[in-house]
Image: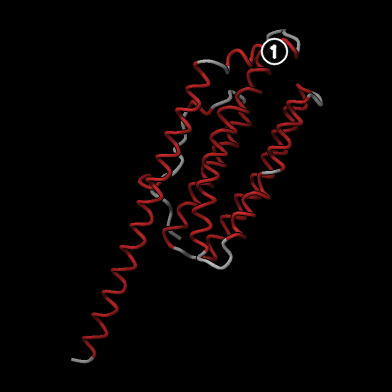
Amino acid sequence: MKIISKEFEVFPWNRNFETRITEIDEQHKELVRLLNKLAGTLIDDNNLEINRVFDELAHYAEFHFQAEERIWIKYFGHDSWVESHQMSHTGFLPKIIEIKEQDLNGPLRDAIEKIVKFLIRWLAFHIIDNDRRMAIVIENIEAGKTLPEAKIAADERMSGSIRVLIDTVLTMYDGLSSRTLELMRERVQREEAEKNYWKQTRSLSRWR
């Protein structure tokens, strides 16, 4: 099995994605690793391997969501923020399965490419906005604030210039992922062209 090289890392991890909650940060890094691994399967275009990595990522995402929700509930109880977060998690897997099933009649590679693009945007926003906002609340609760006070503090910190930063980072990741996927597609096409060339060359040499 080929391993995706740094040249084709569609989602490079950045310290700006850290929530400062070790368990969550480690799980986010693993999700990002699996996302890059899924993108890497597009190079070989092996349906068996694509499905295997897709299932691995889906199962790990489920595990992560459950672990993350346990942490949020510990601090938030059944606050509306937790309910909203849970709804975001609940809609995640059905959405990527829907994208995959929409392209059942076409190459699996095309469906996975759409899923990778969706995952990059979803995961970047989920981490840098939703999870960091929740982490800031926990930070303030541990500093002695009440939950309502901590939520206000988190909203204040995540507004204004930070909101602009989030939008900028997401736009950058969109552009980076699109360009990386384009490079991967070019590599696949080049390798296929080389295979066809050598196949034709061998075929011609037999007739000589």
Residue tagged by mark 1? 150
Residue 185, percent across and down? 38, 56
Look at the numbered disc 1 and give the secondary structure of its residue: helix
The amino acid type, in three-letter code, at marker 1 is Ala
Position of residue 140 in the picture relative to residue 203 (left or right): right
Residue 106, percent across and down? 52, 66
Q: Quadrant of the C terminus?
A: bottom left
Position of residue 162 in the picture relative to residue 182 (left or right): right
Residue that sits furthest to the top in the current view: 144
Residue 48, percent across and down? 55, 66
Q: Nearer the viewer, residue 139 or 81?
A: 81
Residue that sits furthest to the left in the current view: 208
Q: Quadrant of residue 102?
A: bottom right
Position of residue 2 in the picture relative to residue 199 (left or right): right
Q: Residue at x 62, y 25 (%)?
A: 21
Q: Residue at x 45, y 63 (%)?
A: 45
Q: Nearer the viewer, residue 155 or 73?
A: 155
Q: Residue at x 60, y 37 (%)?
A: 27
Q: State whether residue 164 is above or below residue 191.
A: above
Q: Nearer the viewer, residue 139 or 134?
A: 134
